[in-house]
Image (cartoon, helix red, strand yellow):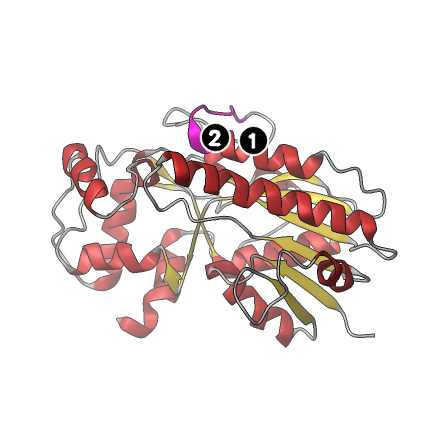
């Protein structure tokens, strides 16, 4: 029997990377999306059918937070996470042979702004503000389902680095001479290479005793200043002008985003993953950037 994996919200950056990786491993990949050509979120019967006998369900659904936090965008950001999670939970309950494992995205932003110490799953302090409330509601919607035949894991994912995604605006800044520190530059930047994120999913699938919350991040976060310096070095660009906070605030208005995305200090480490024996292919930022930027150097 062909193994099945269901990628909910699988048309984004991570989903587009994961789909061919799973296909290469011999999986049939089913994608739930609002885009045509995939299973519709409105088609509950098709969702249940896709989930029947699936080895793995990964929920990546949610409107991008790279926008202004207007009242309407706040509502969509929240609903696009909690409502899709509820749809999936009800569908899993309706299955005769439910998925063996359901991995639901969460975010490392759930922790407070931290420049004093790293946040682990056990000792991390939950923060405050809109983004944190979204993360809390998302995890609450996920764990409120009691699914005796399906393991549940919430991945608190840090910034994912790969060919595309956040790397495009970061490299553009460096390319145009704006690759200096952003704000104070002391804020921590927690990240994970997309290949390690995929390997983490496979590891969690294999370790059938594991469930609950896991931080999905590299064991070696860096400061924003170190991030931008590494980017300049990898790209062979010596000078990068810094961006003070007032400039970022002004620029965020023009490009319709929020400064929290670059100014919040996310100091998150994968304590549980490492204690369970997971090893990273790209543990350091230098190794990750060298792989990602290699074709364009």
Please indicate whether residue 33 sits to the left or right of residue 162 in the image: right
Q: Hey, which quadrant is residue 113 in on the image?
A: top left
Instruction: Identify which residue is drawn at 56% across, 52% down.
Output: 60
Considering the numbered disc 1 on the image, is that residue within a helix, a strand or a loop? helix
Q: CA distance from mark 1 to mark 2?
A: 6 Å
**Dot 1 and dot 2 residues touching (CB under 8 Å):** yes
Q: Is residue 259 left or right of residue 179?
A: right
Which quarter of the image is occupied by the C terminus?
bottom left
* 94 left or right, relative to 112: right
Is residue 227 a member of the stretch shown in magenta?
no
Q: Position of residue 289 (x, y in %)?
A: 35, 59
Magenta-highlighted stretch: main secondary structure?
loop
Q: Is residue 233 above or below residue 272?
A: below
Q: Residues within 10 Å of mark 1 (few under 14, many from 20)?
A: some
Q: Nearer the viewer, residue 73 or 253?
A: 73
Position of residue 182 measured from the top left corner of the image (x, y, whole percent) = 22, 40
Query: Which labelled disc corresponds to residue 211?
Result: none
Which mark is on residue 136? 1
Q: Which residues are magenta?
A: 124-131
Instruction: Name the spot of residue 273 as percent of width and height, x first.
Output: 62, 44
Q: Which mark is residue 132?
A: 2
Residue 139, position in %: x, y?
A: 61, 36
Point 76% across, 58% down: residue? 48
Q: Nearer the viewer, residue 138 or 176?
A: 138
Residue situated in front as seen by the camera: 147 or 172:
147
Which of 37/29 is in front? 37
């Amino acid at each position: 029997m062909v193994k099945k994996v269901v990628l909910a919200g699988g048309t984004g950056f991570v989903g587009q990377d994961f789909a061919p990786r799973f296909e290469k491993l011999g999986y049939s990949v089913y994608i739930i999306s609002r885009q045509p050509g995939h299973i519709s979120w409105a088609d509950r019967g098709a969702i249940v059918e896709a989930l029947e006998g699936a080895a793995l369900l990964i929920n990546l659904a949610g409107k991008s937070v790279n926008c202004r936090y207007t009242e309407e965008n706040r509502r969509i950001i929240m609903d696009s996470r909690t409502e899709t999670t509820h749809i999936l939970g009800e569908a899993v309950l309706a299955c005769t042979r439910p998925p063996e494992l359901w991995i639901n995205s969460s975010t490392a932003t759930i922790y407070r702004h931290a420049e004093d110490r790293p946040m682990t799953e056990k000792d991390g302090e939950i923060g405050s503000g809109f983004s944190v409330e979204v993360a809390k509601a998302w995890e609450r919607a996920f764990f409120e389902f009691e699914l005796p035949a399906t393991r549940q894991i919430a991945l608190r994912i840090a910034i994912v680095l790969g060919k595309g995604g956040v790397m495009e605006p970061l490299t553009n800044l460096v390319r145009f001479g704006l690759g200096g520190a952003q704000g104070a530059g002391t804020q921590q930047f927690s990240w994970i290479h997309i290949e390690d994120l995929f390997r983490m999913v496979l590891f969690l699938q294999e370790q059938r005793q594991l469930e609950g919350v896991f931080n999905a991040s590299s064991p070696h976060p860096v400061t924003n200043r170190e991030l931008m310096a590494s980017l300049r070095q990898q790209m062979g660009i010596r000078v990068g002008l810094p961006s003070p906070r007032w400039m970022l605030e002004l620029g965020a208005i023009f490009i319709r985003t929020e400064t929290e995305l670059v100014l919040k200090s996310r100091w998150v480490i994968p304590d549980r993953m490492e204690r369970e024996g997971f090893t990273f292919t790209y543990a350091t930022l230098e190794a990750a950037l060298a792989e990602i930027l290699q074709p364009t150097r």
